[in-house]
Image: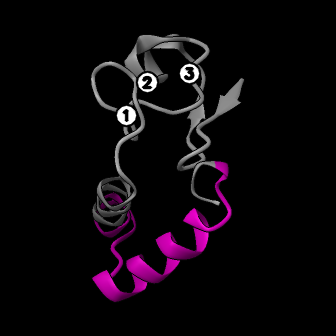
Amino acid sequence: MARCESCGMLMLKPSQHGGGKPFNRYCINCTDDEGNLRPREEVREGWIQFSMKSEGLVREHAEKLVDEQMANMPAWK
């Protein structure tokens, strides 16, 4: 069981790892089709959009939470 080092998503199946590569440290949401980590701002915006939709947050609150969480992720330290 692994967690994405970019967003913290739990990756239970190989298909959830970037590029379908079971040892990739990043999830499919944070990587391109080849499994390479997307730029920080692209990952941040995707995470903000996901938080707004799934948790019903207003953008300002979602941005604050995402920025706090990203600061603790190994990919973004």
Discs 2, 1 touching: Cβ within 8 Å = yes
User: Mark 2 or mark 1, which has the lower sequence index?
Assistant: 2
On the image, the x and y values in percent for residue 54 come to 35, 60
- Classify mark 1: helix, strand or loop: loop
Of the numbered discs 1 and 3, the one sitting upstream in the chain is 3
What residue did someone put label 1 on?
A: 31
Q: Are marks 2 and 3 in contact (CB under 8 Å)?
A: yes
Q: Are marks 1 and 3 in contact (CB under 8 Å)?
A: yes
What is the total number of numbered labels drawn onto the structure image?
3
Against 62, is 51 above or below? Answer: above
Amino acid of disc 3: Asn
- Marks 1 and 3 sit apart, C-alpha to C-alpha, by 10 Å
Using a 10 Å C-alpha cutoff, classify the residue at mark 1 as few (fewer than 14 neighbours), some (14 to 19) or many (20 or more).
Answer: many
Task: Check the image and tell me how it is coloured.
Answer: one colour
Q: Position of residue 49 (x, y in %)?
A: 27, 63
Which residue, given by chain and number where applicable, does mark 3 sit on? 24
Q: In the figure, 46 relative to 25: above or below?
A: below
Could you tell me which residue is drawn at 43 percent across and 24 percent down? 18
Please tell me whether mark 2 sits on a helix, a strand or a loop. Answer: helix
**Quarter that holds the C terminus:** bottom right
Camera-side residue: 27 or 13? 27
Label 3 element class: loop
Report which quarter residue 10 is drawn in. Answer: top right
**Which residue is depicted at the point 52% across and 33% down?**
26
Name the quarter where the N terminus is drawn: top right
Residue at the spot of label 2: 18
Question: Which range of residues does the magenta coloring cover?
Answer: 50-74
Viewer-side residue, 54 vs 66:
66
Q: Amino acid at mark 2?
A: Gly
Please indicate whether residue 64 sits to the left or right of residue 43 in the image: right
User: Disc 2 to disc 3, how far (Cα)?
Assistant: 6 Å
Whether the magenta-drawn stretch holds residue 57 is answered as yes
